[in-house]
Image (spheres, helix red, strand yellow):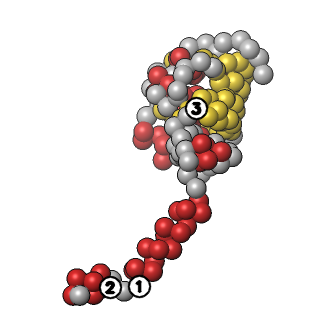
């Protein structure tokens, strides 16, 4: 992919008429909501966008994005680098009422005027492809925290013994 910066917006009348392609990068600092998910805002997302019209005259955006983002591991709260890669197909609509007219596999993207904010579109796709929980691939962060699975298993085993008879503690009170 190209290292050139993607423009802030494209004119939808022109880009769909010319069946344009955009290839380049968008820096994380242009995407405020996505930045809130990151530990640092250094980096960028590589983007490929194709603009065309289908047989039904619907304006279609076919896109791919690829990024590597620093987020917090949900186990140890240390930094972990996650790779995000997504392909998407969107249909550009002017208003919500036009969504019902879309063909089945297309997701809508509402653009009321002729300016399509490319960074907002890519930011939304990045947020959708973020994992629900980010963790290190290896479980090394568990050992760094002093978490031992065997100790946990014996504690669970001991609690299961006492859970067999919930009134066993009352026997000690009676004596």
**Element under disc 2:** helix
Mark 1: give few (<14), some (14-19) or many (20+) Cα within 10 Å.
few
For label 3, the residue is 79
Asked if disc 3 and disc 2 are in contact, CB closer than 8 Å, the reply is no
Q: CA distance from mark 3 to mark 2?
A: 46 Å
Which quadrant of the figure has residue 170? bottom left
Q: Residue at x 68, y 35 (%)?
A: 83
Mark 2: give few (<14), some (14-19) or many (20+) Cα within 10 Å.
few
Question: Closer to us: mark 1 or mark 3?
Answer: 1
In primary-sequence order, the first of circles 1 and 3 is 3
Q: Position of residue 46 (x, y in %)?
A: 69, 24
Q: In the rendered view, does 162 fall on the left or right side of 54?
A: left
Q: CA distance from mark 1 to mark 2?
A: 9 Å
Question: Closer to us: mark 1 or mark 2?
Answer: 2
Q: In the rendered view, does 26 fall on the left or right side of 167?
A: right
Q: Position of residue 80 (x, y in %)?
A: 61, 34
Indicate whether 130 appears above or below 22: below
Indicate whether 5 appears above or below 130: above
Q: Residue at x 58, y 56 (%)?
A: 148
Front residue of this view, candidates 51 and 54: 51
Q: CA distance from mark 1 to mark 3?
A: 42 Å
For label 2, the residue is 168
Asked if disc 1 and disc 2 are in contact, CB closer than 8 Å, the reply is yes
For label 1, the residue is 164
Q: Position of residue 48 (x, y in %)?
A: 71, 26
In primary-sequence order, the first of circles 3 and 2 is 3
Q: Is residue 136 visible?
A: yes
Q: How many marks?
A: 3
**Element under disc 3:** strand
Q: Is residue 127 visible?
A: no
**Element under disc 1:** helix
């Amino acid at each position: 992919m190209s290292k050139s910066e993607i423009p802030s917006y494209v004119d939808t009348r022109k880009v769909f008429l010319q069946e344009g392609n955009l290839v380049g990068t968008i820096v994380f600092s242009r995407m405020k909501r996505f930045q809130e998910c990151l530990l640092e805002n250094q980096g960028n997302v590589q983007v490929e966008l194709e603009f065309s019209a289908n047989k039904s005259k619907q304006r279609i955006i076919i896109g791919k994005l690829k990024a590597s983002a620093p987020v917090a591991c949900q186990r140890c709260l240390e930094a972990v680098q996650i790779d995000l890669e997504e392909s998407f197909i969107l249909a550009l609509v002017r208003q919500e009422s036009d969504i019902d007219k879309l063909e089945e596999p297309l997701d809508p993207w509402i653009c009321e005027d002729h300016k399509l904010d490319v960074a907002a579109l890519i930011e939304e796709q990045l947020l959708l492809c973020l994992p629900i929980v980010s963790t290190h691939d290896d479980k090394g962060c568990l050992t760094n925290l002093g978490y031992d699975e065997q100790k946990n298993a014996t504690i669970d085993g001991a609690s299961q013994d006492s859970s067999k008879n919930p009134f066993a503690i009352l026997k000690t009170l009676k004596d």
